Amino acid sequence: MTKEQIAAALEEIATLLELKGENPFKIRAYTNAARSIEAWGASFADLQNEQALEKIPGVGKAIAAKVKELATTGSSTFLEELRRQFPPAILELFSIPGLGAKKIKALHEQLQVSSVAELQAACESGRVAQLSGFGETTQGKICAAIASRAKHAGSFQLGAVASEAEQLRCDLAAHEEAMQVSLAGSFRRRKEIVRDLDFIVATNSPEAITAYFCQHPVVENVIARGPTKTSVRLRSGIQADLRVVSNAEYPFALSYFTGSKEHNIVMRNRALDRGWTLNEYRIAPAPNAKSTPPEIPQVNDERELYRAFGLEYIAPELRENCGEFEAAENGSLPRLIERENLRGTFHCHTTASDGHDSLEEMVAAAQELGLEYIGIADHSRSQIQAHGLHAARLQVQRAQIRKLNETQKSIRVFSGIECDILRDGSLDFDDEILAQLDFVVASVHSNFSLSEREMTDRVIRAISNLFVTMLAHPTGRLLLKRDGYAIDIPAVLDAAAATGTWVEINAAPKRLELDWRWWPLAKSKGVRCVINPDAHRASRLQDLWFGVGAARKGWLTKADVVNCLPLTGIETELKKKRSNR
């Protein structure tokens, strides 16, 4: 078992103990141990060494023995015994928003509910509403959550499948019989939600590539296998399709299977206008052309394919038929932001609130990525469940950051706060405290059910504060789990432009907002973007790359994203809004 799998097993033990109604301290011990194991930087051999394990904070003798068993055998007799005490499907209930262990325990013991299907039946019969602590309102919310879950079945967050997808792509590219390899489809276009994965491989040995694809470790089972197309199910549950083509067919297949459907329709119509036909394998003369078509040019790659239709190359992220053809025809396509353009980032959490890694570990991870600066923004005091900082603890952290900056020469650490926007639009700290910080991230974390007008006024009041630097996750959505709250985004963008407030692309795969569809409008209003990972552990700083994909999809350039500025530039920008006082 890997370190991550062991941590997941400990989390499952904690969950099952909670369902049993065990001692809260025992439950918390397994949760804390899971976090410590996940953050531990030791080797796999150390996971099999009880003495080394017992030195990890939060891992005592009993848990160390269980970790060793998991690392050595791949299973745990204690976990298996716990699992036997509950129906296998009961853990699915934790995927329903609003259901914690106490409510699930009540549903299981009083209504014999042990799966999502049984929960739905209990809601539809009205039995859930009759339970103490539930009621009609809770029952209605559960029904809506189950319906939303069913609607999103077969859909996956981009970040949830990225690791598997990239591993499979890299391994296919390393195969001796592969000449060209790419991931296509919505994954290549960087859609926030994907339903399947498309792999395109140019090869002279289709059977060898297909056999390798089917036998890859991330493949769970083979759905269908053919001479040119093969479909499998990966361990994450997503379907992956392989298409093997010749080198000559590759640019056409890559373009076609990248899509989108709407983009492809325009491409085919442009072909017909020239007396050609375009499909996933080639350009050919149209059989019913009224006049002699122009000579079909040689096409060796996608750039030459677009050139054949009188267009500049259109980046995959823009292929949604949202103005890219007009821009490609008149030479006005933007030079999109690249990964290497990012010079730093903000909105990162530490163990001071609900983060998994220390201040020093977060800074070290940012240095490893080559960033010039990182902004620490732990939660403010209203976020009790996230151990939000009170003023005194915030002052302690500021002192720690000052001391750290004295010893760091290759990176600058900025001191900030993720400050809750309260119901009336006021902020969780007063101006006297906010003025002492380098930056302030303003966020909504409560009262999601306000009317659109109330929520819009609430957010605009908050970002009008001189000390608010940026607005985080502007609609509060959680992809595939929770829709965003009602809010007038154009009005918020107008206010952001007027006040000089940056608007975040939250790069966490579960959020990826402000949504890419709004960024052309935001850019036209002069709103500055900031790409932040909302990282609660050092490894999640890597999510910045998902944010770059969302920015590219929103037509953003290096100049549109404020954290593409070098350290000297960002220091100037951080002071601008406050200088209006």
Image (tube, grey):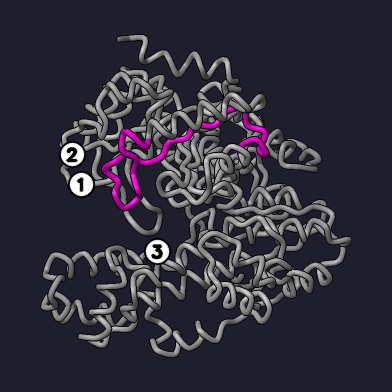
Q: Amino acid at mark 2?
A: Arg
Identify the residue at horizontal 54%, vertical 59% (top origin).
57
Query: Which of the 4 image quarters holds residue 203?
Result: bottom right
User: In this image, 536 relative to 298: left or right?
Assistant: left
Q: For this view, does 500 lie left or right of residue 173?
A: left
Q: Nearer the viewer, residue 515 or 365?
A: 365
Q: Does residue 484 sit above or below 214 in this rendering?
A: above
Magenta span of residues: 366-393
Q: Is residue 402 visible?
A: yes
Secondary-structure class at tag 1: loop
Q: Is residue 305 above or below residue 438?
A: below
Mark 3 residue type: His
Q: CA distance from mark 3 to mark 1?
A: 25 Å
Q: Judge depth for marks 2 and 3 and give the one in front.
A: 2
Mark 2 highlights which residue? Answer: 423
Q: Secondary structure at mark 3?
A: loop
Residue 290: x and y in percent read 64, 42
Residue 375: image location, x then y, percent: 49, 31
Instruction: Give the spatial CA distance, label 2 vs label 1.
Output: 7 Å
Q: Earlier in the sequence, mark 2 or mark 3?
A: 3
Q: Residue at x 60, y 71 (%)?
A: 235
Quadrant assignment for the N terminus: bottom right
Report which quarter residue 506 is drawn in: top left
The reply to whether callout 3 and callout 1 are in contact (CB within 8 Å) is: no
Assess disc 1: are there few (<14), some (14-19) or many (≥20) residues with their C-alpha within 10 Å of its C-alpha: few
Q: Which residue is mark 1?
A: 447
Q: Which mark is residue 152?
A: 3
Q: Are marks 2 and 1 in contact (CB under 8 Å)?
A: yes
Q: Quadrant of residue 128?
A: bottom left
Q: Residues within 10 Å of mark 2 (few under 14, many from 20)?
A: some
